[in-house]
Amino acid sequence: MAYMTDRKRARGLGSAKTGTAHFWAMKVSSLALLVLIPLFVFTFGSALGGTYEEILAYYARPFPAIVAALTLIVGFKHFNDGVQVLIEDYVHGLANKVALIVMTIISYGAAAVGVFAIAKLAL
């Protein structure tokens, strides 16, 4: 017979035993986006309106390509985590699992396509 209080059993686990880790992942990704979004806007803004050759030359430099790729990766991961919370709150049963799988595939697929496009421009 274990003599643990309710608080001791629940500490740091959340209701599904992953709530705290998920909460911190969302906070970290939002802070990363707080830095990446202005960098992306400034790097993308200076390339906006250029010809195709100018854009190729611009994204051949490592800094704009890395900023754009990181913004896409972190942004879609943050999107996936946020949609996961919404699905877990409002969708139940088998539809919950299907919706989580579909949204994960869509968000990671979109991030992969974006990173591939940036790599194609940069290389």
Image: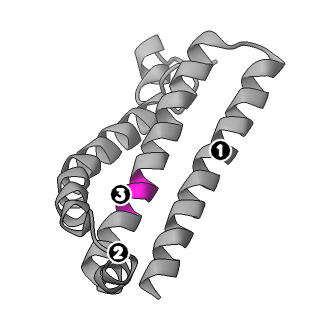
Residue appearing at x 45%, y 36% in the figure: 22
Q: Residue at x 56, y 30 (%)?
A: 84
Residue 75 locus on image (x, y percent): 40, 48
- The kind of residue tagged 1 is Ile
Left or right: residue 4 versus residue 53 is right
Question: Looking at the image, what colour scheme do you see?
Answer: one colour
Q: Amino acid at mark 2?
A: Ala
* Labels 1 and 2: the sequence-earlier one: 2
Main SS category, magenta section: helix
Picture layout, residue 15 above or below residue 90: below
Name the side, left or right, on which 38 lies relative to 26: left
Disc 1 designates what residue?
106
Q: Which segment is the magenta one?
A: 70-74
Q: Quick one: label 1, few (<14), some, or many (20+) residues within 10 Å?
A: some
Question: Looking at the image, which is closer to me, 95 or 4?
Answer: 95
Task: Give x and y (percent) for residue 85.
Answer: 52, 24
Q: Are marks 1 and 2 in contact (CB under 8 Å)?
A: no
Q: Is residue 35 magenta?
A: no
Q: Which residue is mark 3?
A: 71
Q: Amino acid at mark 3?
A: Thr
* 3D distance between C-alphas at marks 1 and 3: 17 Å
Q: CA distance from mark 3 to mark 2?
A: 10 Å
The circle drawn on residue 65 is 2
For the question of whether residue 121 can be seen, the reply is yes
